[in-house]
Structure formats: C-alpha cells, structure tokens
Image (cartoon, helix red, strand yellow):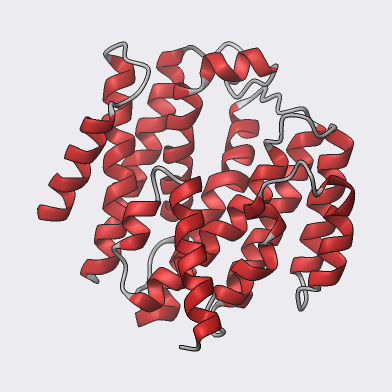
Amino acid sequence: MSQTDKILEKEAMHMLKLTSRTFYIPIKLLKPTLRETVGSAYLCMRAIDEIEDHETLDIDVKQQLLNETSVLLKSDFDEEAYSELLAPYRDILPEVTLRLGDWIRFCPEGIVGKVTESTSVMATGMAKWAGKEWQVKTEEDLDDYTYYVAGLVGVMLSDIWEWYDGTKTDRDLAIGYGRGLQAVNVLRNKDEDAERGVRFFPENWTRDDMFAYANENLDKADEYMKDIKTRNITLFCKIPLGLAKRTLKALKSGKEKMSRQEVEETVDEIIND
C-alpha cells in the first residue's frame, strides 16, 4: 500500500467514526479487504444520505443533486463534474459528501462497480422520495422507501460477501435485514420526523403496527444470517442486528434509545460470543 493509500485509509476510517455510531465498530472489526470495501460503501452511501437529509437545501435542489450524482455514478466517476455540481453548495455540504470521489477510490477495484451501482440506485430513490416530501401513505410506500435507503445496503453487502469468498445469501432476506434496521430508526425518530414534517408511518398505522413490521423484517435478518459461514462476516452482521433488537426492546419499554453503556455491553457480548 502506497503512502497516499495509507493516508486515505486513515482518513476514511476517521470519517466513519465521525459519521456512524452503529457501523463504525463492526466495520473496524473486518479483515483489511472487507474493511476497505464495506467502509468505502458506507461512506459513498452516507455522502448521498447527507444530501437527502440536509436541513437547508430546497427539495428541488436535493432532487437535482441526487439525480445528477446518480448519473455520474453509472460510469467512470468524473470528480471534476461532481465538484462543479456541488460548487454552489460547497459551503453548506459536509466533508463526507464533498469527498465522494475519495471514497470510491478507497474501494478495491474488483468490487467498486457494484458499490457505485448500488449507490446510484439509492440516489435515484432518495430523489424520488424527496419529491414526495417523504410522505408514506401505504405499506407499499414504506416498503419502497425502506428498500431504497436500507434494503439496497443489504443487497450490496450480499454482493460484497460473494465477491470476497463466494458466500451466497438470499437477496430478499438481505432486503428484509435492511428494512428491519430502518424500521427501528423510524420508530426511534418518530417525534423528530413529525417536527420536520415528514411521515414514515402508513396512514392508520399505530406504533404496534410499526413494531410488527420491524420484527417481521428482523426475523428475515435472522434467516439471512444462516447462509453465512465466514466468522468475520457473521460478526459484522450480528452487531447492527443485535443493536436493532435491543433498541426495539428499549423503545417498547418506554425509553427513547439505548444508553451508551448498553450499546457497549451489547457489542461486547456479540464479540465475545
């Protein structure tokens, strides 16, 4: 690894630590090739997620940035064109978004095409839901939204596992895994989302309905795990799943979220299992 690559790896891992409470630990525990791949993939998707979630960008601007980024990701990524696209908003966009080209470069050559393809599809889906102002009306809407922002992550990870050592997993169960994690986020952020004027609960759904949706999809995550025999990959998958289940339990008992100590204890239990 060249000195430039070492610097980029260090910066990428630092950015992961800054941007992800849930995924930094399991990514750090992966072996080098997987760590680079999954780390890069997370940062690419986080880069576009920050556009979708930005507090001050207008919806039409979000749609334009996401759609045009999606197009750039479909071929050899043109960093100059991306820089020009973001130029009017450079002062308000976070570093993780501005450095998308670096995160693509950080990804191993043999799998980078899958990562950029999945990120491109996600950007298109995010642009669509920005246009809908994030108003979920039916369970089909919820499935569609959670597919784009989380189910796609599961599919991409399945592609990475297969590329890495031939591990084959069920793509539908992978989507369920992602949906389950996202449903827990929806439950956790319900009040905050309402304040922002967005709604991810289908019409006439209660919290119990969303708990049932989360549990149904987390059950699929458990099934998904059964196909994975590589310990390093299993460990990676277990940590976000374990945290999601514990968070669900905390929410059911009336807490807003898990404490930092509970998070650390859960992670330690999984690592030492």
Please state which of residues 165 and 12 is positioned toward the viewer in this rendering.
12
User: Which quadrant of the structure image shows residue 91?
Assistant: top right
Name of the residue lying farthest toward the left: 273
In this picture, residue 118 sits left or right of residue 206:
right
Q: Position of residue 270 (x, y in %)?
A: 17, 49
From the viewer's side, name the closer residue of 252 and 205: 252
Q: Does 208 sit above or below residue 18?
A: above
- Examine the rendered structure and indicate whether residue 74 appears above or below residue 122: below
Instruction: Using residue 101 as the reference point, say whether residue 154 is left or right of it.
Output: left
Locate residue 272, reporting x and y percent: 10, 54
Q: Nearer the viewer, residue 3 or 15?
A: 3
**Residue at 87% in and 54% down:** 87
Is residue 246 positioned above or below 25 on the image?
A: above
Closer to the camera, 77 or 158? 77
Q: Residue at x 74, y 67 (%)?
A: 73
At a point 62% along the width and 47% down the height, the residue shown is 148
